[in-house]
Image (spheres, rainbow, N blue to C red):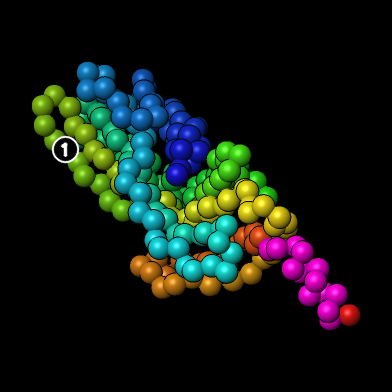
Amino acid sequence: MIHALLEASLRQLQGDLGDVVKPLSWRLGPIAADISPPWVALYGGAIALAPAPKSLDPTVAVSDFQQEFWVAIASPTAQTLEQLTSLIVASLSLRQSALVERFNQSSGPGGHTYSTAQVATRHRLRQIQFVGAAPDYGGDRVRSQLQFRAIGQLEMRLLTSEPGTLLKTVVTTGQLAQAPHRWANVDHTTQWETTVDASTAQKGAGDGG
């Protein structure tokens, strides 16, 4: 769900921390055990998807999601590990708004993150949380895994309709009503698209005139 976020975060960390420890290897994805420290690796973790609220439009479903992601660090000394841990948490926390905005721009209004001729999805982020760290002191190196959580929304859409049905897309902005869930404190103000039967809408307008 958040590959673009991991790429943007890696570039941001390289820019913010590139001169702190030298040499320092950066990787996207799990890193081989035989790579000598110091190194930093970013990779995605488990995904949880909330039940989609019932929609009047069977061709669209919108669900909240969260995905864990990890920043793994290996260092030859505990002091360097602590230094990298502190600075990485600070960088991703303070850069959160810019990272979220950059991610969302990749699939702006009317756009898709992924699509086929039949179905499309759009991933939108709202928040990045720092969850915690799990250091591991053993052998000739020290390691730590920093756990983060990305919280956002997944829109799923059918791009084809039943024969004879004309679909029209309407873009609107407002408060998206959702069923209560464990991320209820997250701001749900967003922009979404609603697909309606254009022929029905035109008929209703004619009856009212």
Describe residue 106's horizontal placement relative to residue 69 as left or right. right
Q: Identify which residue, 163 or 23, lies in the foreground.
A: 163
Q: Is 199 contained in the magenta span?
A: yes
Q: Above or below — where is 12 with respect to 61?
A: above
The answer to whether 53 is drawn above or below residue 115 in the figure is: below
Residue 36: give x, y in percent of width and height. Answer: 25, 19
**Residue displayed at 62% across by 48% down:** 159
Seen as rendered, the residue at the extreme front is 163
In magenta stretch: residue 72: no
Give x and y (percent) for residue 41. Answer: 34, 31
Is residue 195 something one can see in this rendering?
yes
Instruction: Classify residue 207 as left or right of residue 147.
Output: right
The residue wearing badge 1 is 136
Quarter holding the N terminus? top left
Please tell me how many numbered marks the rendered image carries. Answer: 1
Q: Which residues are magenta?
A: 196-208
Relative side of 31 to 152, left or right: left
Q: Nearer the viewer, residue 28 or 201?
A: 201
* The C terminus, quarter of image: bottom right
Vertical side of 93 occupied by 178: above or below: below
| Residue at figure coordinates x 42%, y 70% from the top left | 184
Describe the element under mark 1 as helix, strand or loop: strand
Q: Nearer the viewer, residue 83 or 68?
A: 68
